[in-house]
Image (cartoon, helix red, strand yellow):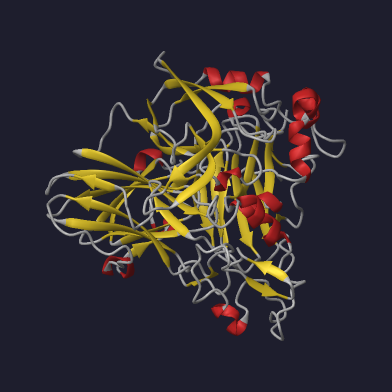
Amino acid sequence: MNSINRRSVLLAGLGVAGAGALAACSSGSSTTPALVNPSGSAVAAAAKKRKGTGRTQQVTLTASPAMLDLGGGVMARSWAFSGQAPGKEIRLSAGDTLAAELSNQLPNKTSTSIHWHGIAMRNDMDGVPPVTQQAVRAGTNFTYRFLADAPGTYFFHPHVGVQLDRALYAPLIVEDPKEPLSYDDEWVVVLDDWVDGVTGTPDEVLAELRHGMGGMDMGGHSSPSGHEGHDMGDMGGMDMGEDPSSPSASTSSGGMSMRFMLMGAESELLGGDAGDVKYPYHLVNGRVPAEPDVYEGKPGKRVRLRIINAGGDTAYRVALAGHKLTITHTDGFPVEHEQVDALLIGMGERYDVLVTLGDGVFPLVALAEGKNATGMALVRTASGTAPKPTVRPKELNGRILTASELRAAADVRLSPKKVDRVHRVELTGGMDKYNWAINGKAFDMNDPAANPLTIEEGQRVRLDFVNTTEMWHPMHLHGHTYQLGNGGPRKDTSIVLPKKKLSVIFDADNPGQWMLHCHNAYHGEVGMMALVAYQG
């Protein structure tokens, strides 16, 4: 999620300068203490402590251009792993080692990487150029090798530019050999907001968003003083009445194209402003609602749904018509079971739920929160007519819990302990200048160790996320799983609502240099990132 314009030059040159960049990063700049090297002895020592099965699974992941059939006659030219979206699922047993060879066949000398989202692994396999590795140059290969010892629902995606918003993602499931849940089948459900190859590319989206709203001629409308969100009075109707899949569906304001910027997206669940980007489609398992993915089962069977939000800018409210969902896990870790009608899932989050199937044909609907659009898949246990693609089950407006209302299962709850280190993580910026940042400073890929949040191995750490902005942010910490408050769920990605504070705690038990960032692809890209770094 480093910049694709200025920073892509840096990344392309890392093949030559990579060793120097990593060395500089690991030694720290003149104003910061020495930091643990991502490939150093402390990282190796921590890796040796992980209990493994001795088994290694080998896969090859080829990143290349692809023409994707999204169903319903929608074809999209994108980049994907082995020509499909989502990419082929990888499934391991806890303790197995994954050896994944990335073959970069992307065009135009485009560098890439793979980040293994949610996995607490050795630092030099985390896939974050230029912090933990050199970017993988076009025409070259790189093998990621790590032991996955925590069972759960994860996924993987690039960490270069806004490639996250293409099709370079796939589920990674780590099974528990001592699985305590009882169920008959599994269905992995991947949600995604889609623009690439339809109305434009993610890079074009970013280029438009970078202009911000401050320099736009609003035709007499102006943002209320101090308000940097999207609530621009009666401008909420600007994107109405147009076919979003049409290239002509753009609004000009003062001569500036508004092909992609979304106006008037509001959500009470998200505290107001719901998102920046106008997506023509919302996908469930790579399919549009007009020709959905179908899960076929039998009435009375108990199914585990592993739900992953791989989107770039959209939170989803998810419900299965005619059914209750029992939440069992979030971000791979078990919670005390809660029965709900629907759940809210931000970008980068994962939820596991159990459902007992009814008799008939039922839509699984992912409502793009605040955006008045949906993705859909079907559960079919009998013959019958499929519902319309625009169906909105009543469950979407039923009981819905947010993560803060869940509690970690007893066996994964952190033991009470004095906090040794506290970092205030102020989320700053806004739409006016599109200057999203952490503690007022945009992350600089040219000097990634400039302003690290330093910690030491063995410490109990608290991060206080303080959202000063008008928009929600899903905050993701690499290499660790933190706990929300005292006894809340264990997570690695959490929604921080506008003008709210969220405190999380974790134990510093995985040395290295780890990214902490907003998982909105565009917010992270312009600078809402920081480095959580272990001192050497």
Instruction: Note whether residue 117 is visible.
Output: no
Outermost residue on the top side: it is 54
- Indicate whether 533 appears above or below 256: above
Q: Position of residue 477 (x, y in %)?
A: 57, 43
Does residue 224 lie above or below 50 as drawn?
below
Instruction: Tell me where residue 411 sits by quadrant.
Output: top left
Report the side of 159 relative to 76 (left or right): right
Q: Residue at x 69, y 79 (%)?
A: 223
Q: Position of residue 400 (x, y in %)?
A: 35, 64
Q: Position of residue 329 (x, y in %)?
A: 36, 45
Using the rendered image of the protein, determine whether residue 169 is visible from the camera's viewpoint. yes
Of residues 385 and 521, which is closer to you in this image? 385
60 lies above or below 35: above
Rendered residue at 71%/25% (across/down)? 37
Which image quarter: residue 13?
top right
Residue lying farthest to the right in this orientation: 30
Return the residue nearer the eye: 404 or 496. Answer: 496
Residue at image location 69% in from the left, 41% down from the top: 531
